[in-house]
Amino acid sequence: MKINRLFLHTAAALGAAFLLMAGSAAGLSGSLISAYAAEEPAAPSESVTWQNCYIEGESVVVEGSLSGGITPADTAMGQDENLYLLALDPYDDDVAGNRYVQSVKKELGQVSFRVPLELGTSESKLYKKFVACIWDGGKYIRVSEPIYITNPETVAVHRDSYKEPLTKKGLLVELPEISDAFELGVSHVIVNIPYNALFGSGIDYTYEGETYHFNKEIVEAYDNTISMFSNKGMLVNAILLNGWNDGTPDLYYPGTQKTDAANYYHFNSKTEAGYKDIKAIATFLADRYSGENSDYGRVQNWIIGNEVNNQQWNYIGPMALQNYVDEFERTFRVFYTAIRSTCANDRVFFSTDYNWMNEANGTTKYNAKEFIDSFAALTRQRGNIDWNLAYHPYSIPMTEPEFWDDFGTGLVNWEETSPVVNFANLAVLTNYMHRPELLNKEGEVRHIILSEEGFTSQSITRGECQELQAAAFAYAYYIADSNPDIDAFILSRQIDAPSEAALSCAFGLWTTDSTTDNNITPARRKYIWPVFKNIDKRAYTLEVTEFAKDILGIERWSDVIPGFRWAKSET
């Protein structure tokens, strides 16, 4: 039977106060010795630094070290000899009103707790954050930062291994043109899933005792799309987005208002209702697209949000970088735990744009490098989970296809503080991700995918330039393909989007006669089409990219690409 520790402590404190008053009334005050002789400290001496938090069998093990000293026992703050472990919900930042799950005697040095996981019950610790506290006779005082479970995959039902495609070549595909994608030999695809559109009727899903209602027509459309891709051996990358829907207010951070400045909004894990919604939907999606049912298909990579270092794509409202990252990390962990506790070997990513150290304003736009650094520091402190990076290395400007001359903009260089990192200096990113503080918990470089990039065939200054587009793709693909730290190169897009083409961002392999971005249809293949098709085929790759050497002014690809994959085949 669990008894609220706060109640016990409060009762004890009231009892002590009653005895003191009774003693005074009896004329014994002169013989009573004050319970607290020493001066009350302003803060406790104890400080707990966490080292591990993991599931082991049916328990959660939380390990750390207690340093700083022991608050004197003759003070109110030091009167209790125990150290208490509290388990808080992710949205709860206040220890008041919570109960401890285990206590140990205060001793400097290593400290360890072992508590029941209680998976599948109302007391489940799967999503909890654990904090260490002392008791001052009336309240808990926090003496640690929070830490979360780092291995939720331990309890996953779906344990199929991660299936690596044969090549890194990917494409944003228009589903009606799936046969063209098959002909092109696409290995990686993108599917956008807006959370705000999933609620509805037709599919009832019960999670942790609550029933959620999903739009059957929309979910079945995703079933069709994802299964069509994955059943043909394509690796599906699902981007989870949060568009605006007046009917789903719990999905938005408290106080967030719809704004024309935002395309998508930050997922809300700050309230109980928002936290429950996002973990339920994430679990539903991970379970449905686990690959167990071929009619639904399989998603292996999950990207949480889009270019989250820019609030245009992840709006929460003006906020300092550290506060913004704190909220994003809170939300990312909910997604991560939901996905990995369902499908053990799925990978979870967040994405940034190419503004590595550029265009930040400190309130709604943040440098990608500083966002990554801050996020990594928080996850090391709160439990080093296997987060991964989806990066968008567009040319600068995007209205010109060449990236190899981007050094002339003054925004691209080989320093780790380069304003922009794109294909011209992609090694700046991958080298940086080798830093010890950015490695995963196994000491390995995290997975990096290039999940969105494109090259225009319609220069804003020179008009149509299809050969330049094809040359830029060939060079960029070879750079990515020859870099062992890049897992995938996903080109945007299969067919020109009319809205983008109007801005001289005609990124497609096909032109289009469509006038809106709805139901885009192909018109004519561009010069890039056969280059894209054959670039990952040993027998044709060098032949199909030969034209690009004159455009770039080179004789051999290996002269400009370190570790060029096809170097031995070059004559």
Image (cartoon, rainbow, N blue to C red):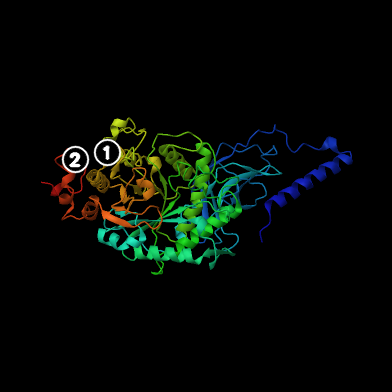
- Tag shown at residue 114: none
* Residue picked out by circle 2: 551
* Residue picked out by circle 1: 462
Label 1 CA crowd tier, 10 Å (few <14, some 14–19, many 20+): few
Identify whether 297 is placed above or below 276: below
Q: Residue furthest right?
A: 26
In this picture, residue 441 sits left or right of residue 475 = right
Residue at position x 15%, y 47% in the image: 546
Residue at position x 60%, y 61% in the image: 122
Label 2 CA crowd tier, 10 Å (few <14, some 14–19, many 20+): few
Q: Distance between the residues labelled 2 and 1?
A: 15 Å
Residues under numbered marks 2 and 1 in contact, where contact means CB atoms less than 8 Å apart: no
Whether residue 177 is visible here, answered yes or no, is: yes
In this picture, residue 79 sits left or right of residue 466 = right
Whether residue 289 is visible here, answered yes or no, is: no
SS at badge 1 = loop
Q: Which numbered mark, 2 or 1, is in the foreground of this view?
A: 1
Residue 154 horizontal/vertical position (percent):
45, 59
> Which picture quadrant has residue 41?
top right
Identify whether 494 is placed above or below 310: below
> Which picture quadrant has residue 178?
bottom left
Please name the amino acid that badge 1 sits on: Arg
Who is closer to the viewer here, 259 or 522?
522
